[in-house]
Image (cartoon, grey):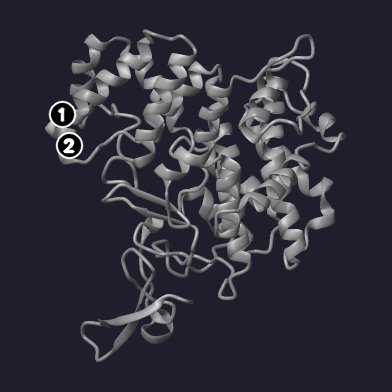
Amino acid sequence: MSGTANGSVTISLDGTNQTMKLPLLAGSIGPSVADIRKLYGSLGIFTFDPGYGETASCESKITYIDGDEGVLLYRGYPIEALAEHASFIEVAYLLLNGELPNATELSEFDMSVRHHTMLHEQLRRFFEGFRRDAHPMAVMCGVVGALSAFYHDSLDITNPEHRTISAFRLIAKVPTIAAWAYKYAVGQPFMYPRNDLAYAENFLYMMNAVPAEPYKVNPILARAMDRILTLHADHEQNASTSTVRLAGSTGANPFACIAAGIASLWGPAHGGANEAVLKMLGEIGHVSAIPDFIGKVKDRNSNVRLMGFGHRVYKNYDPRAKIMQRTCYEVLDELGIKDDPLLDLAMALEKIALEDDYFVSRKLYPNVDFYSGIILKAMGFPTSMFTVLFAVARTVGWISQWKEMIEDPSQRLGRPRQLYTGPTQRNYVPLAAR
């Protein structure tokens, strides 16, 4: 543990003479943490923290969030600066390696990713095992997990070279898998990746091109997609990242770990929030219906929720939301969508919510999902692909977190404790006597 010693916390058990000093560790930024690793051995008690909202599960140098101030840093760099000035591939290099690349390093990294975008040809037949109407996330879980059966030449997680090759393969191949999952669902031919296209361009090409005619990627939309990927690349120890780390702690191969992360992301409380925003806007229907909707949100008995506002971590304006809002206008302008009912409805809802004391006092600010669904819908993505795009972006964060965990000498098998509230020991009763 490389956290700096910063005093201690004393715990006393009432009614006994037992006390213990817990080391207080300080990171480079953020609140200090009490090191409770010897708590059970010294006092015979555990801590109870459902959802791990008050527990640091690991030490990491990758991403930092200050939810109260609305700050998101990748390796120390503000998300606003990276989204504005860096490409997603540059951000991927940063997350994986800890530093921004120079021109030569970026060129070599980019070329390595481009040369791993092809899938093993036998994987084409793997897609045919799914029903045509299968959810793309189900396909993603299956195909990404199956990569270990096709690329088992690099599954030694103790080998640094194998870890690097696996990272390149995942970052490069997940967009191809995602695009093919879409093509399979709509009955169109798979489009092979092109090494002459940048990361976001290549993904849009594989999604939208058909063999019958040439397809030119719109540079404005490619830049918007690149920015969307950057904004979703990593987000500290969220549910899916924690899942990847927990699976990785068992020694599972990286393809299996990322497949586990995709499964976790699939949940509507995690990766499906932007789809829920569109559904909510559709149910509201018109700006005139907003006051009635807001009234239902405030009514505890109505079970109506304001989707796209508030965040488990951010208690301020999500810094990604401001960038996404600007990107939303750029995309709609490029596509010639002047009067988009959904956007008009979203803007009116945002204005009302930001001025209403009920929401302001609860710090329910717009988050990144509030705008991303509108952008993706305008770009022609079906709602079933929204979470898939999230997975494409988050893969680089997952593999960076997995790599950091594997290389951490203090890493242990993940094994959460529990507060048992079931029956105490009982005697077995024979079947005839029950």
Q: Position of residue 375 (x, y in %)?
A: 46, 22
Q: Residue at image x 24%, y 19%?
A: 293
Q: Residue furthest front?
A: 103
Q: Is residue 288 left or right of residue 219?
A: left
78 or 310, which lies in front? 78
Image coordinates for residue 302, horizontal then vertical, percent: 24, 26
Which kind of residue does numbered mark 2 sit on?
A: Val
Res. 295 image quadrant: top left
Q: CA distance from mark 1 to mark 2?
A: 7 Å
**Residue at image location 66% in from the left, 31% down from the top:** 178
272 up-or-down from 66: above or below: above
Q: For this view, does 96 lie left or right of residue 369?
A: right
Q: Callout 2 environment at 10 Å: few (<14), some (14 to 19), or many (20+)?
A: few
Residue 112 place in picture, x, y as percent: 74, 47
- Examine the rendering and report whether any part of residue 260 can be seen: yes
Q: Element under label 1?
A: helix
Residue 382 position within the rendered picture, expressed as x and y whole percent measured from the top left? 55, 19
Q: Which residue is mark 1?
A: 355
206 relative to 96, above or below: above
Q: Which residue is mark 2?
A: 360
Identify the element where label 2 is drawn.
helix
The label on residue 394 is none
Amino acid beneath label 1: Glu
Is any atom of residue 299 visible in this view? no
Q: Is residue 130 depicted above or below 319 in this figure?
A: above
Q: Earlier in the sequence, mark 1 or mark 2?
A: 1
Do the numbered discs 1 and 2 sit on residues whose CB atoms are within 8 Å?
Answer: yes
Q: Crowdedness of circle 1 by 10 Å Cα count: few (<14), some, many (20+)?
A: few
Image mark count = 2
User: Is 421 positioned to the left or the right of 382 in the image?
Assistant: left
Q: Tell me the residue at 76%/66% (across/down).
A: 159
Give the residue drawn at x 30%, y 82%: 8
